[in-house]
Image (cartoon, grey):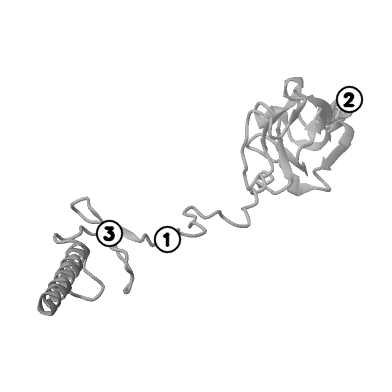
Amino acid sequence: MRASVLVRIGLVACGAAVALAVGSPAWADTTININPGNVPTTAAGFDSHSCDPNQGGGPFTGQDVWVFVLPGNHSGSGDFVSVVADFGANGTVTITSSADPGNFSNGGPATSKAWVVTPAGWTLTGASAVITGTADFFVLTHTCPAMSSPSPSPSGSPSTSPSPSGSPSSSPSSSVSPSGSTSTSTSPGSSESTGVTPSGGVKAGGGDGTSPAGLAWGLAALSLATGGGVALLIARRRRDNA
């Protein structure tokens, strides 16, 4: 009698447990949107920049990295299942934890993160995500903008000390002595003399020291003397004949 009663009680308890398990709803994934205050934006224009090798890496040449996070505690906010990022005219980028595990940081205890890589300069206009938890939205936590290209160096540097095309040279014919007088050099044989004429007059061409004036007076005196001698001789002859 007691055994049958206990069996009945056990069967009732099992039935209640099964009913409770069947009646409880399964934990379902939910779809949420990005914080509207984060968009639209470019990676370079976003206010938080960070390049983490564990979150997409970078910086890359010609590529931007975008990192999303589920706010709150991991136990309540859950994990990312997929992310669809909308870049307007450039289209959408979709990643899933099953096909792209390298783009997610799931499993806790830290908050779940996901990242995408796009060509540089794209503008994020919106995004949605499927999550396992109860977060109301997700955020763009930071970006890693593309590395700027180095500016080309000039092919040649201008000379800083240009040399003149030619240095003028002059050979003045006269030189200034320290005392301030100018002396002019003349070639040998030149009759021109720029010095002071010595006292006594210009030397004669024959090399004697007689001046032209003295020579003229000598010739005149000689003529007078000659004329006087002839006159005296004529007078004597007339006297003798008489």
Labelled disc at residue 194: 3
Image quadrant where one finds the C terminus: bottom left
Rendered location of residue 77, percent (x, y): 71, 28
Helix, strand or loop at mark 2: helix
Q: Is residue 198 above or below residue 111?
A: below
- Of tags 1 and 2, the one toward the viewer is 1
Q: Earlier in the sequence, mark 1 or mark 2?
A: 2
Report if residue 110 is visible in the image: yes
Q: Do the residues labelled 1 and 3 touch (CB within 8 Å)?
A: no
- Of tags 1 and 3, the one toward the viewer is 3
Q: Name the residue under label 2.
A: 23
Helix, strand or loop at mark 3: loop
Q: Which residue does the image show at 18% across and 61% down from the upper left?
A: 201
Which amino acid, mark 2? Gly
Q: Does residue 151 appear left or right of residue 164 in this picture?
A: right
**Which one is nearer the viewer's eye here, 51 or 229?**
229
Q: Mark 1 points at which residue?
A: 169
As measured in the structure, the alpha-carbon distance from the residue carrying label 1 to the one carrying label 2 is: 113 Å
Q: Earlier in the sequence, mark 1 or mark 3?
A: 1
